[in-house]
């Protein structure tokens, strides 16, 4: 398994089911990015009453954010914690509330697990090669989200560029020519070196439906580092040298907990719990199609923390959830909107203002089918010092949320701790908020329309 600075490279583990690493992308999410505002006359009246200095912001479906998140698995790694499908893998996936997994392992037993998860609403981004793509996709068709090409080929020996260009073309043609698979999206291979490899590989837009990127934050706050020392803008620009203007999938991302690692710094479990939900909102706001956390489980015990590859999981090897699992589970359950005809559900707009200490403040406006707005807001501040390996205290920032009308009901949530509201307010048009270094959710009920 090859290690390169500020990134991770995955390879098959001895004793595992056959795996073809790869990447995948989603088309569905692109449909909701610019949906028409359409949420009752009360919103129109609210916008008319809004101060001229306050601009209306279009909301995105809350359920779209839930559908945005995925997690990497290795269901065929039988010498790791993934061997316990019934005791750990399946119950933790269902508890988490995730709807998408990414995997490249395959045999008849693993196929049964994919299909089982599919019956519970979990879809698969499947990594494979051109020779086996159609045969396996036909068996997986009910649960497939997309097909993805070879994973991080630039981390392997040999002249990888002509090989991968030819393989991507063959993969795309094979999938699109078969009547049973032609409607499946195909994602281009991911690249380990985000800085140099995209220009070497070159544009492949005729052979892909999704671009692919692995922007590991390497111990940094989510918006400040997208791998190899690159900014968010630079990393995306490099990825587009391969995918052009096609939508991009983040098929691997996240943190590990080996804090002593030098080339790819880790973070504490406490910091990861703050960073991961923020990371998803950063990627969501930036227009990525989906984001897959690497990975669901710590694969093998490593009490001495000698190998970072054994500490990427949301769940420990014994099945115990880490704090980041709890934070993500609570966030997904709070924002899930069952029955939403995603991604075609229309949303409205809200003219609101965040006033006060707004430096380094990020927010995302969402809306559920019942018309309720959900505002996610957080400080994009460092919660961990990768040099001293210490957690950092992030002082809350005082902010005033100004609405265009008095809301009949506002609730505040701290998903890192609970799904229970920490505060309830009624009849307020302005409320004081203390914005922490973790995600704060503000549920806002609009006034009911009057006849």
Image (cartoon, rainbow, N blue to C red):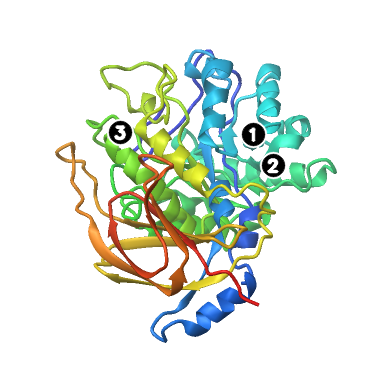
Q: Quadrant of the N terminus?
A: top left
**In the drawing, what numbered circle is on residue 171?**
2
SS at badge 3: helix
- Pointer 2 local density, CA inside 10 Å: few below 14, some 14–19, many at least 20: many
Q: Is residue 225 above or below residue 84?
A: below
Q: CA distance from mark 3 to mark 1?
A: 32 Å
Q: Are marks 2 and 3 in contact (CB under 8 Å)?
A: no
Residue at x-position 30% and y-position 51%: 229
**In the drawing, what numbered circle is on residue 128?**
1
SS at badge 2: helix
Question: Relative to the observer, which residue lies in front, 409 or 78?
Answer: 409
Question: Relative to the observer, which residue lies in front, 184 or 355?
Answer: 355
Residue farthest to the right?
A: 179
| Spot occupied by residue 450 in the image (x, y as percentages of width and height) | 61, 75
In this rendering, the label closer to the viewer, 3 or 1: 3
The answer to which quarter of the image holds residue 419 is: top left
Q: CA distance from mark 2 to mark 1?
A: 9 Å
SS at badge 1: loop
Q: Is residue 349 above or below residue 382?
A: below
Residue farthest to the left?
A: 388
Q: Which residue is mark 3?
A: 269
Q: Are marks 2 and 1 in contact (CB under 8 Å)?
A: yes
Residue at x-position 58% and y-position 51%: 63
Q: Are marks 3 and 1 in contact (CB under 8 Å)?
A: no
């Amino acid at each position: 398994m090859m290690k390169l600075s500020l990134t991770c490279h995955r390879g098959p583990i001895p004793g595992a089911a056959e795996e073809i690493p790869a990447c995948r992308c989603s088309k569905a999410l692109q449909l909701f990015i610019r949906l028409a505002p359409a949420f009752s006359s009360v919103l129109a009246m609210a916008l008319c009453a809004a101060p001229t200095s306050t601009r209306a912001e279009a909301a995105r479906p809350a359920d779209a954010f839930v559908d945005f998140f995925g997690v990497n698995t290795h269901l065929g790694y039988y010498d790791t914690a993934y061997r316990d499908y019934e005791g750990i893998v399946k119950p933790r996936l269902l508890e988490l509330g995730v709807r998408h997994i990414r995997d490249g392992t395959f045999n008849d037993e693993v196929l049964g697990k994919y299909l089982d998860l599919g019956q519970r609403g979990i879809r698969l981004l499947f990594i494979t090669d051109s020779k086996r793509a159609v045969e396996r996709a036909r068996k997986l068709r009910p649960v497939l989200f997309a097909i993805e090409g070879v994973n991080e080929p630039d981390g392997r020996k040999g002249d990888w560029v002509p090989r991968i260009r030819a393989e991507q073309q063959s993969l795309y043609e094979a999938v699109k020519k078969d009547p049973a698979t032609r409607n499946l999206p195909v994602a281009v291979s991911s690249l380990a070196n985000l800085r140099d490899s995209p220009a070497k590989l070159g544009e492949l837009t005729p052979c892909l439906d999704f671009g692919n990127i692995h922007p590991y934050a390497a111990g940094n706050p989510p918006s400040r580092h997208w791998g190899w020392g690159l900014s968010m803008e630079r990393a995306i620009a490099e990825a587009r040298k391969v995918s052009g203007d096609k939508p991009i999938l983040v098929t691997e991302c996240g943190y590990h907990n080996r804090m002593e690692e030098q080339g790819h710094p880790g973070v504490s479990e406490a910091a990861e719990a703050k960073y991961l939900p923020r990371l998803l909102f950063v990627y969501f706001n930036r227009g990525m199609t989906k984001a897959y956390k690497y990975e669901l489980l710590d694969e093998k015990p490593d009490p001495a923390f000698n190998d970072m590859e054994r500490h990427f999981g949301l769940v420990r090897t014994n099945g115990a959830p880490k704090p980041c699992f709890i934070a993500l589970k609570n966030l997904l359950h709070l924002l899930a909107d069952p029955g939403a005809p995603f991604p075609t559900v229309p949303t409205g707009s809200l003219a609101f203002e965040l006033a006060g200490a707004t430096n380094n403040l990020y927010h995302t406006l969402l809306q559920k089918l019942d018309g309720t707005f959900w505002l996610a807001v957080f400080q994009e501040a460092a919660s961990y010092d990768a040099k001293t390996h210490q957690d950092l205290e992030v002082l809350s920032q005082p902010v005033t949320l100004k609405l265009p009308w008095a809301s009949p009901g506002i609730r505040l949530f701290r998903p890192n701790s609970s799904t229970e509201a920490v505060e309830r307010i009624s009849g307020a048009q302005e409320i004081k908020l203390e914005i922490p270094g973790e995600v704060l959710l503000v549920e806002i009920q609009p006034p009911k329309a009057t006849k």
